[in-house]
Amino acid sequence: MAQTTTSSTAPANHLLGWGSIVVIPPPTHIQEQTAYIAIKTDLLKLPKTTWQPLPLVSRLGLDLLHAKPDLKDNPMSSLGGPNTTLAALTLECDPTSASFGKSTRTPMGGVSFRYANEVEQLGQSVLEPLEWFITERLADIKSALGGLEGIAAATAEYEKLGPQAFKMVFKKHRAEQRRLYPGPSMGWAKLECPVVVTVPSCEACGQLDETSAGGKAMMRCGRCKKVLYCGKGCQEEDWKAHKPFCLSK
């Protein structure tokens, strides 16, 4: 069994978020990008019973809900083609499950997403890397399942599906967005990762701190004293990503 990784939700991300977000996929016959429409949750006028949990996303340390409104409640629910975002966030990634590799929800048109606590703002900046991460991890699990070690290797890959692994992907996504949109007005440089991993680990590669088990002691950032690294190489690799958040004590 993999070591249990605890996490908590980071402070609200204000980039591209405004309470809830409606994801509208393009029609199948049109080559357009998915539309992300930020909206105040109360304007959706959805009963609380309409909102449903996302168990796989909860495994990653994010307590998100989704809703597929009736057309009479929200005309946006009828727009677009297959909602690939919800399909990805409801994929069954457990290789021992009879429904492995399948989505539990594959609706057409717009779907609304929000945080369960109704306080934090959810945006495209969280949903996009979530979709990519789950899709890529499922591909890795399938690849392992087809290898020599079969189900054992696939189960090991599945156990890696957690907050720490998602944090690494989110940081890469944030770095790429900073490269594409370098201006301070977009806010990518200071966008917090939506998951805070509380188990000590290397900020660059995700390696867990094994000092208590007799392993090599990790080094702390000499400036903020908050994050850990395997060594100087990992610290140098992570500096550009960590610098905007590195505050001296």
Image: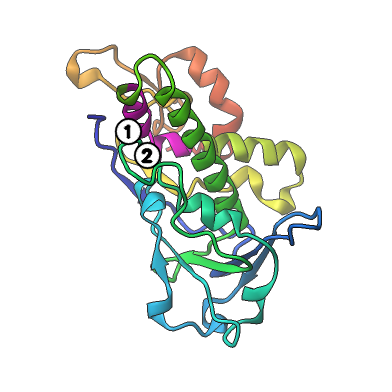
- Residue at numbered disc 2: 162
Q: Is residue 9 visible?
A: no
**Mark 1 in CB contact with mark 2 (< 8 angstroms):** yes
Give the SS element for disc 1. helix
| Residue 161 counted in the magenta span | yes
- Near mark 1 (Cα within 10 A), the count class, few <14, some 14-19 or many ≥20, is some
- Residue at numbered disc 1: 159
Task: Residue type at mark 1: give it.
Answer: Glu
Q: Is residue 126 visible?
A: yes
Instruction: Please give the range of residues in magenta.
Output: 153-168
Task: Residue type at mark 2: give it.
Answer: Gly
| Residue 200 counted in the magenta span | no
Residue 19 in percent (x, y) is at 54, 70
The residue under the point 43% across, 52% down is 10
The residue under the point 22% across, 29% down is 1
Location of residue 15 (image quadrant): bottom right
Majority secondary structure of magenta residues: helix
Is residue 180 positioned above or below 233 on the image? below
Q: What is the C-alpha distance between the residues marked 1 and 2?
A: 7 Å
Q: Quadrant of the C terminus?
A: top left
